[in-house]
């Protein structure tokens, strides 16, 4: 009973931190630097530091929330179904873009980090940096990397992508909704999609679609590439 109450309290703390972070982000008009996930993680980390609770113990108590990542991944399939017409219309170019983008996302950071002799745990966590958190965490649990470190790097990648990619693509005159959406969704996943949603609904739809497809592609490609990186 005590364990159940402690687990409930840990999950409630995480959800409360996220809701508070979401409210703060809304007041700041959802600036990418105030990403709710990042702010919520900071709140939880501060609480653990003040309370002196080990991260491993808190992770075990909040395990029910991690279990929900599985259904969350399945639920993302709704985006594929809702955009099935767009997938059929652009199946060839979209497939090539997703596969090349996923391979680039895996090998660019992890490969360079490996060549530079960085810590193996960091190299492993960098491999899924360009997919959204549920995919990255599930891949790390399967392949033996650090889910927590991977999730942090995913958020950092998403924030940087949401800030830098749209102005860069506009400067290159690649600002069509389809192009913008696929590029942002591929590189900055949910964080970038969330930022696009408040500016261009069509671009956000393609971004969400690219996020899901990139996650699926990386789930297939990363276990194959993993043996060459390590």
Image (cartoon, rainbow, N blue to C red):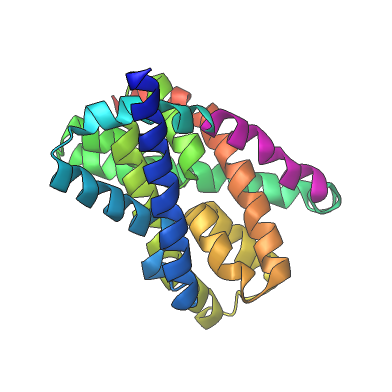
Quarter of the image with the N terminus is: top left
Q: Residue 80: within the magenta?
A: yes
Residue 196, image x and y in percent?
Answer: 59, 69
Q: Is residue 168 visible?
A: no
Residue 199, image x and y in percent?
Answer: 62, 77
Which residue does the image show at 80% across and 43% down from the upper left? 81
Q: Is residue 228 left or right of residue 54?
A: right
Tell me which corner region of the image, top left, top right, bottom left or bottom right, holds residue 12: top left
Magenta stretch secondary structure, dominant? helix
Which residue does the image show at 66% across and 41% down from the upper left? 76
Task: Single out the residue that lies furthest toward the front.
Answer: 1
Tell me which corner region of the image, top left, top right, bottom left or bottom right, holds residue 61: top left
Which residue does the image show at 70% across and 60% down from the upper left? 205
Compared to 206, does 104 lie above or below? Answer: above
The front one of 210 and 8 is 8
Which residue does the image show at 59% across and 80% down from the upper left? 173
Q: Is residue 56 left or right of residue 133?
A: left
Q: Which residues are magenta?
A: 69-83
Q: Is residue 225 left or right of residue 169?
A: left
Residue 225, image x and y in percent?
Answer: 42, 28
Task: Single out the residue that lies furthest toward the top.
Answer: 1
Residue 109, image x and y in percent?
Answer: 32, 46
Q: Residue 106: within the magenta?
A: no
Quarter of the image with the C terminus is: top left
Tell me which corner region of the image, top left, top right, bottom left or bottom right, holds residue 116: top left
Q: Is residue 194 visible?
A: yes
Q: Is residue 200 left or right of residue 138?
A: right
* Number of numbered discs overlaid on the protein picture: 0
């Amino acid at each position: 009973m005590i364990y159940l109450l402690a687990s409930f309290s840990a999950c409630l703390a995480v959800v409360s931190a996220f809701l508070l972070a979401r409210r703060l982000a809304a007041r700041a008009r959802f600036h990418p630097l105030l990403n709710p996930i990042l702010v919520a993680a900071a709140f939880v980390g501060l609480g653990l530091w003040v309370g002196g609770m080990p991260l491993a113990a808190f992770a075990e108590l909040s395990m029910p929330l991690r279990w929900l990542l599985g259904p969350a991944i399945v639920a993302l399939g709704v985006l594929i179904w809702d955009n099935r017409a767009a997938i059929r219309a652009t199946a060839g170019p979209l497939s090539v873009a997703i596969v090349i983008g996923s391979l680039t996302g895996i090998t660019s950071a992890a490969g360079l980090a490996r060549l530079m002799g960085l810590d193996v745990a960091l190299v492993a966590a960098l491999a899924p940096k360009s997919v959204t958190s549920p995919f990255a965490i599930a891949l790390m649990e399967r392949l033996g990397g650090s889910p927590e470190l991977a999730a942090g790097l995913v958020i950092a990648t998403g924030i940087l992508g949401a800030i830098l990619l749209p102005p860069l693509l506009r400067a290159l005159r690649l600002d069509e909704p389809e192009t913008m959406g696929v590029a942002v969704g591929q590189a900055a996943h949910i964080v970038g999609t969330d930022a696009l949603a408040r500016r261009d609904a069509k671009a956000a739809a393609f971004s969400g679609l690219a996020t899901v497809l990139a996650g699926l592609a990386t789930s297939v490609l990363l276990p194959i590439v993993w043996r060459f990186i390590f």
